[in-house]
């Protein structure tokens, strides 16, 4: 029996592959659990329709990420920090603190693991931090440290 996989199946194949499996495995597991469809014209049309829907959803997510990148460019997050002699900052501002302040003040949620340079900010003044919002879409946010 030949089937088209709708999802990745361990030790069988990747999503979209046309594979040959035993009749019982194909009917009783793959098709029953909606992991595959029969390799017929209708099955191929269904897979093509699903791929088109995924492509459109991907384009929509990319547009949203680009709009968010433009929004982030206008935002400056200000952190008040203790400063010692010669203008040295006590401690630093981590990506987690940046994400929390962005969420609390602007209701924008980003993943702290998506920062391109995840090093903490430890210098007075304005620092630009880059965030990968989506594949190929990089947003920049200004982080400003001021003396308390």
Image (cartoon, rainbow, N blue to C red):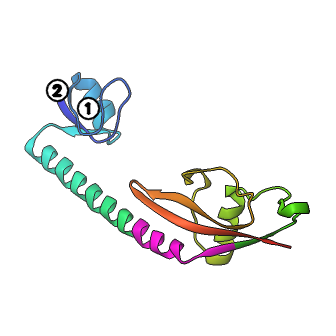
At 86% from the left and 58% from the top, the residue drawn is 90
**Quadrant holding the C terminus:** bottom right
| Residue with the mark numbered 1 | 27
Let me know if residue 84 appears in the view: no
At 26% from the left and 32% from the top, the residue drawn is 27
Q: Is residue 112 magenta?
A: no
Q: Residue furthest right?
A: 85
The earlier-in-sequence mark between 2 and 1 is: 2
At 58% from the left and 61% from the top, the residue drawn is 129
Q: Is residue 73 magenta?
A: yes
Mark 2, residues whose alpha carbon is within 10 Å: few (<14), some, or many (≥20)? few
Q: Residue furthest left?
A: 41
Q: Nearer the viewer, residue 28 or 42?
A: 42
Relative height, residue 140 to residue 78 (above, below): above
Q: Main secondary structure of the magenta part?
A: helix
At 35% from the left and 36% from the top, the residue drawn is 8
Q: Nearer the viewer, mark 2 or mark 1?
A: 2
Instruction: Give the x, y percent position of residue 122.
Output: 75, 57
Instruction: Give the x, y percent position of residue 100.
Output: 69, 65
Q: Is residue 52 left or right of residue 122?
A: left
Segment tinted magenta in the rendering: 64-77
Q: Nearer the viewer, residue 84 or 138?
A: 84
| Residue with the mark numbered 2 | 1
Q: In whole angstroms, how far apart are the C-alphas of marks 2 and 1?
A: 9 Å
Instruction: Give the x, y percent position of residue 109.
Output: 58, 66
Q: Residue furthest front?
A: 86
**Quadrant holding the N terminus:** top left
Q: Quadrant of residue 83?
A: bottom right
State if disc 1 and disc 2 touch (CB < 8 Å).
yes
Let me know if residue 80 appears in the view: yes
Q: Nearer the viewer, residue 132 or 100?
A: 132
């Amino acid at each position: 029996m030949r089937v088209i996989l709708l999802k990745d199946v361990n030790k069988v194949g990747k999503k979209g592959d046309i594979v040959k499996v035993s009749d019982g495995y194909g009917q009783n597991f793959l098709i029953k659990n909606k992991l595959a469809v029969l390799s017929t014209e209708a099955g191929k049309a269904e897979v093509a329709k699903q791929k088109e829907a995924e492509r459109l959803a991907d384009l929509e997510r990319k547009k949203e990420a680009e709009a968010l990148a433009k929004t982030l460019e206008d935002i400056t997050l200000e952190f008040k920090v203790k400063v010692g002699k010669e203008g040295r900052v006590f401690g630093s501002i981590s990506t987690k603190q940046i994400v929390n302040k962005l969420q609390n003040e602007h209701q924008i949620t980003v993943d702290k693991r998506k920062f391109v340079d995840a090093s903490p900010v430890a210098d007075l003044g304005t620092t630009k931090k880059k965030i990968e919002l989506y594949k190929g879409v990089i947003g920049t946010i200004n982080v400003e440290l001021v003396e308390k």
